[in-house]
């Protein structure tokens, strides 16, 4: 039994797709199926079962045990490689990072470039997703690091704070608020708003702050990412409250106006998360240090 076979099995479970697992491991779908059968024959246990009429792959009871232990073996193997590379002082390997769109598209790129310039033999593999999916992928070992807004403490998860963002109001250049530099939350009452979807942390924080000031707004639309929200505001759907770094380019290009929200409440904490029981690779540790340094420099 080879370590590559264990990785194929875990990738299949994580990605829920024979084709994607095959693509990630540079083999055919039939080779994935063959390797799964080889594992089941070796341990004389059914590890996976297909759900009739659906593409879902479900773990059996034996499969759950096997998957958990495979993850431990693969993590130990990765750590072995890192330790051996560390003996010659070379920081290399790929750090898998999952993040939300607003952070990944607008805040991480400069840090990724800085990391790559310092450690050219290493690579940052960025994936974009919703906060719940990011945290889930960190906990199940699909990615090594997650970067999210409003990180919530939970068992098994370590949080390293990054620099926080200001939440700001945005509007089109021809809006009545466009020439304002600051606005009070009370002035937003009964205004049309484009919002993040309800399960997104920034939306939850926005709702909580508005409620604390007794302000009700009119919901025009909800979206799951900041890019769609910005485009909606540009064409006049309504106002929006978003992280300031995500709209700097649009303000420079005269597509949107940024208006500061007067109250001190409008802060969005950002943090790196990883599994507490996992020993990070040397490259991942260096990347976390870089992101943490940015927070310390901003203070």
Image (cartoon, helix red, strand yellow):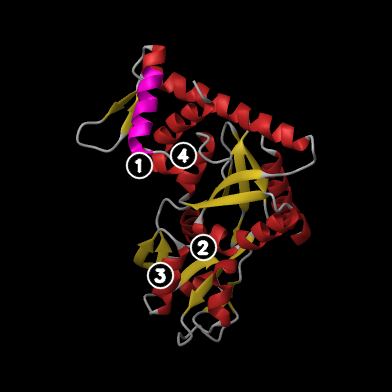
Secondary structure at badge 2 equals: loop
Say which residue label 1 marks: 19
Judge depth for marks 2 and 1 and give the one in front.
1
Cβ–Cβ under 8 Å for marks 2 and 3? no
Please name whichever residue, 103 or 240, is drawn nearer the observer in this view of the structure: 103
Against 247, is 257 above or below?
below
Q: Earlier in the sequence, mark 1 or mark 4?
A: 1
Residue in view at x 38 percent, y 79 percent: 235
Disc 2 vs disc 4: which is toward the camera?
Answer: 4
Task: Give the numbered dot on residue 25.
Answer: 4
- For the point 53% across and 70% down, which residue is it? 185
Q: Which residue is mark 2?
A: 213
Q: Residue furthest left?
A: 53
Give the mark, 2 or 3, whose residue is nearer the N terminus. Answer: 3
What secondary structure is marked by label 3? strand
Secondary structure category for the residue under label 4: loop
Image height check: is 118 above or below 86? below
Q: Earlier in the sequence, mark 1 or mark 3?
A: 1
Q: What's the CA distance linking mark 2 and mark 1?
A: 51 Å
Q: Residue at x 25, y 31 (%)?
A: 51
Q: Position of residue 297 (x, y in %)?
A: 78, 59
From the viewer's perspective, tell me whether residue 296 is left or right of residue 2: right
Dot 1, crowdedness within 10 Å: few (<14), some or many (≥20)? some
Q: Residues within 10 Å of mark 2 (few under 14, many from 20)?
A: few
How far separated are the C-alphas under marks 2 and 4? Answer: 53 Å
Q: Which residues are magenta?
A: 28-40
CA separation in Å, label 1 and label 3: 41 Å
Where residue 34 sits: x, y (%)?
35, 27
Q: Nearer the viewer, residue 7 or 290?
A: 7
Q: Nearer the viewer, mark 1 or mark 3?
A: 1
Q: Main secondary structure of the magenta part?
A: helix
* Cα distance in 3D space between marks 4 and 3: 45 Å
């Amino acid at each position: 039994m080879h370590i590559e076979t264990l990785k194929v099995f875990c990738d299949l479970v994580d990605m829920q797709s024979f084709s994607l697992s095959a693509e990630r491991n540079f083999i055919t779908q039939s080779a994935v199926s063959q390797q799964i059968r080889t594992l089941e024959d070796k341990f004389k246990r059914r590890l996976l079962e297909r759900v009739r009429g659906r593409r879902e792959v479900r773990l059996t009871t034996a499969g759950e045990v096997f998957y958990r232990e495979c993850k431990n073996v693969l993590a130990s193997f990765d750590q072995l490689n890192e330790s051996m590379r560390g003996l010659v002082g070379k920081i290399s390997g790929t750090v898998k990072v999952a993040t939300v769109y607003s952070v990944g598209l607008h805040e991480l790129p400069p840090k990724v470039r800085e990391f790559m310039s310092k450690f050219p033999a290493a690579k940052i593999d960025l994936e974009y997703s919703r906060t719940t999916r990011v945290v889930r992928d960190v906990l199940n070992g699909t990615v090594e690091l997650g970067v999210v807004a409003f990180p919530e403490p939970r068992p098994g998860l370590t949080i390293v704070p990054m620099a926080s963002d200001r939440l700001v109001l945005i509007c089109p250049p021809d809006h009545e608020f466009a020439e304002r530099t600051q606005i009070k939350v009370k002035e937003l009452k009964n205004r049309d708003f484009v919002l993040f979807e309800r399960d997104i942390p920034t939306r939850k924080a926005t709702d909580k702050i508005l409620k604390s000031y007794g302000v009700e707004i009119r919901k025009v639309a909800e979206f799951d990412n900041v890019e769609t929200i910005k485009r909606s505001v540009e064409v006049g759907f309504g106002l929006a409250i978003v992280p300031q770094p995500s709209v700097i380019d649009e303000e420079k290009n005269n597509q949107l106006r940024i208006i500061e929200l007067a109250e001190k409440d409008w802060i969005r904490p950002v943090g790196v998360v990883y599994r507490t029981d996992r020993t990070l690779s040397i490259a991942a540790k260096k990347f976390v240090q870089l992101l943490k340094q940015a927070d310390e420099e901003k203070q």
